[in-house]
Each structure stands twice: as structure tokens, then as C-alpha cells.
Image (tube, rainbow, N blue to C red):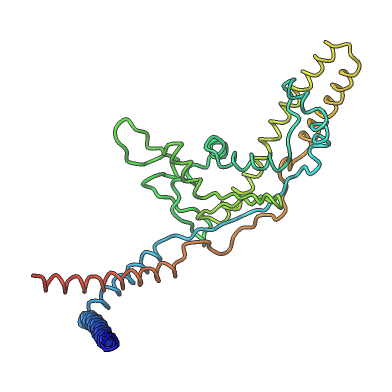
């Protein structure tokens, strides 16, 4: 009796399992059929609206071509540089290691490593005050803010006369009453920052300065000017510090009768004098040219082909979405 009951229960269990499996398979089949029907429906909607899709995509493609062709060419000139003073300013590194603590207590700067100074120079060249002094000294604001292109045939800049009149050298922007037509210092700084790129490889110590402008000769010229300005800045700074430190050390020698301390101060004066002499005679004081800049011959941007490809892709996606949304909105109504 127990065996017969077990047999019947096993038959019932098998039957239920079979039915459940058949039910799952059926649901899966129905779901697959629904998915297939949905995909076929979407394809049929897209196919029915193919003329609209092609037309919209073509409009986007033509618009992207027109926009790409309207953009003026930009040219990039770059220069690769390296620290000019690999011996740490004539032995200043060794002196700093020996007397650094004493010099710091006395308020004397014996200088740091070259990489540290190069990192400082990179940040300085990117800063607003440095760039403002740069364009003011060389009168570059019109070339930064008002140029809209370059005439390659005649090698001349094309100015936007609604912003600046190159003949009268007057700014012509329309502004509210009480405001100046000339762009502000911050606006000029932001625009110049877009043209300037600076990178420093800490491993090799190499520094790359690049300028991108409508005019290849201007891009080439500005890279050289930036190198001169940063060298001049550190040259003048070190000369002033050296003079100040030498005068201070001489006063300290006069104040002390301790021979050992006088010897230390004389060593410091000797190193500061070397720094002063080096600053006075060096043209490439902080950084020296490794790979000189060249007048660029090929444009760096815009990437017109990329604009066209993106325009076609955007037009295709927009047109398909438009056809599908329009179809389903009609069905809902």
C-alpha cells in the first residue's frame, strides 16, 4: 500500500513538473513572438518614414558642412625646453644642503631644485597677472580679442571691425552706457588661456609651450616671447634677491667676531655673487631651447571631417526618433 501511494505521488509530481515546463516554454515563446512583432513593427515604421529620415539627415549633413567650412583655420606653434641650470645655479644646491637651515633662519633664499622652479614657472605662465603683463608689454590685446582670421595670400590679419578698428586703433564694441568698449582684462585672460598650452614632464624635465592662433607667424612669435618673458622674470627676481642677500650677509659679517660664522657668511656671499653673475650674462636663464619653434604650415583645427561625421550621425538619430515619436503620437490620438 505504501509503495502504491509513493508511485502515485511520483506520477503526480512528474505530471506537474511537465505542465510547469510547458507553461514556461509557452510564455517564453509568446514573449519571443511579441519581441519579434515589436521589432518588425519598429522596422516597418522606420521603413515607411525613410524619405523623412533621409531628408532630415541630409539637412543636418549640409548644415554641418556649411558650419565646418565657416570656421577659420587655427595654427599651432610649439617649443620644447629644458632647465638651463643643471648644476643648480653654480653650486647653490650643495650650499643649500649645507647651510639651508641657517640661511632660512636668516631669511636668505638659497634656491631650490630645478624641477621645483620649472613647476613654479608653469603655474606662473598660466596665471592672470603674468599673462596680463605679457599682452600689455607687447600690445597684443587686439590680436587676442579682435582677430577673426588670417589672409594667407597677403599674410595679414583679418579683424572683426565690429570689435576693433585696426586703422584708427580704436575699440568699436557696442556696450551699455557707462561701459568701456574695450574688452576687460579677465575676458582677455580667458581668451589667451584658450590659445596657450603648457605641459611639464617631471621625469625628463622637458617643458612644452604651445600657442594656437589664426596666424602662423603670430603663433610662432608669441611662443618665443613667452620663453623670453619667463626667463627675464626669474632673471630679474634672482638678481634682486642676490643683491639683497649680499647686502644682508655683509652686514652680518660686520656684526659678528666669530671666525667660523664669518667663513659661513663669506661662502654664502660667494654663491650669491655667482648667482648674480650668471643672471647678468645668461640669455636663457631658467629654461633653454631643446627643440625650437617653427612657423606652422598646416592647420591644427578645426577638424572639419569630424564635424561632418558627427552632423550625419546626429541627423540620423534625430530623424529616426522624430519618425517613431510622430507615429506613436498619432496612434495615441
The picture places residue 313, in percent across and down from the top left corner, at: 35, 71
Q: Nearer the viewer, residue 324 or 159?
A: 324
Q: Residue at x 59, y 60 (%)?
A: 296
Q: Is residue 311 left or right of residue 324?
A: right
Q: Residue furthest front?
A: 1
Quarter of the figure with the N terminus: bottom left
Q: Nearer the viewer, residue 65 or 154?
A: 65
Residue at the (49%, 61%) spot, across then down: 301
Q: Quadrant of residue 76?
A: bottom right
Numbered disc total: 0
The image shows residue 193 at horizontal and vertical percentages of 51, 46
**Which part of the image, by quadrant, shows the C terminus?**
bottom left
Observer-nearest of 271 and 187: 271
Provide residue 228's location: percent of width, then percent of height: 66, 42
Q: Is residue 220 visible?
A: yes
Left or right of 303: which side holds 119? right
Residue 217 left/right relative to 51: right
Residue at the farthest left position: 333
Whole-percent x, y for residue 268 in the image? 83, 25
Q: Does 150 appear above or below 320?
A: above
Quadrant of the rendered image containing residue 138: top right
Q: Is residue 32 visible in this depiction of the protein? A: no
Q: Is residue 314 above or below residue 166?
A: below
Amino acid at each position: 500500500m505504501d509503495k502504491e501511494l509513493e508511485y502515485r505521488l511520483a506520477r503526480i509530481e512528474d505530471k506537474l513538473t511537465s505542465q510547469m515546463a510547458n507553461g514556461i516554454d509557452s510564455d517564453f515563446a509568446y514573449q519571443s513572438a511579441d519581441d519579434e512583432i515589436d521589432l518588425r513593427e519598429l522596422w516597418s515604421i522606420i521603413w515607411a518614414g525613410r524619405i523623412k529620415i533621409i531628408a532630415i539627415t541630409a539637412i543636418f549633413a549640409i548644415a554641418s558642412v556649411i558650419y565646418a567650412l565657416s570656421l577659420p583655420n587655427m595654427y599651432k606653434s610649439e617649443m620644447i625646453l629644458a632647465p638651463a641650470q643643471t648644476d643648480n645655479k653654480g653650486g647653490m644646491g650643495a650650499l643649500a644642503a649645507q647651510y639651508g637651515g641657517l640661511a632660512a633662519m636668516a631669511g636668505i633664499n638659497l634656491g631650490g631644485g630645478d624641477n621645483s622652479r620649472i613647476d613654479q614657472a608653469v603655474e606662473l605662465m598660466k596665471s592672470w597677472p603674468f599673462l596680463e603683463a605679457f599682452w600689455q608689454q607687447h600690445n597684443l590685446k587686439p590680436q587676442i580679442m579682435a582677430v577673426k582670421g588670417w589672409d594667407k595670400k597677403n599674410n595679414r590679419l583679418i579683424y572683426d571691425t565690429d570689435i576693433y578698428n585696426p586703422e584708427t586703433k580704436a575699440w568699436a564694441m557696442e556696450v551699455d552706457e557707462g561701459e568701456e568698449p574695450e574688452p576687460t582684462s579677465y575676458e582677455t585672460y580667458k581668451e589667451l588661456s584658450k590659445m596657450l598650452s603648457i605641459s611639464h614632464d617631471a621625469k625628463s624635465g622637458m617643458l612644452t609651450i604651445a600657442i594656437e592662433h589664426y596666424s602662423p607667424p603670430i603663433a610662432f612669435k608669441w611662443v618665443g616671447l613667452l620663453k623670453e618673458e619667463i626667463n627675464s622674470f626669474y632673471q630679474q627676481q634672482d638678481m634682486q634677491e642676490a643683491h639683497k642677500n649680499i647686502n644682508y650677509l655683509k652686514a652680518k659679517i660686520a656684526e659678528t667676531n666669530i671666525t667660523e660664522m664669518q667663513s659661513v657668511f663669506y661662502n654664502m656671499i660667494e654663491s650669491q655673487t655667482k648667482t648674480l653673475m650668471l643672471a647678468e650674462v645668461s640669455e636663457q636663464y631658467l629654461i633653454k631651447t631643446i627643440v625650437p619653434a617653427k612657423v606652422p604650415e598646416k592647420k591644427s583645427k578645426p577638424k572639419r571631417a569630424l564635424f561632418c561625421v558627427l552632423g550625419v550621425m546626429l541627423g540620423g538619430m534625430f530623424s529616426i526618433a522624430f519618425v517613431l515619436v510622430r507615429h506613436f503620437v498619432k496612434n495615441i490620438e
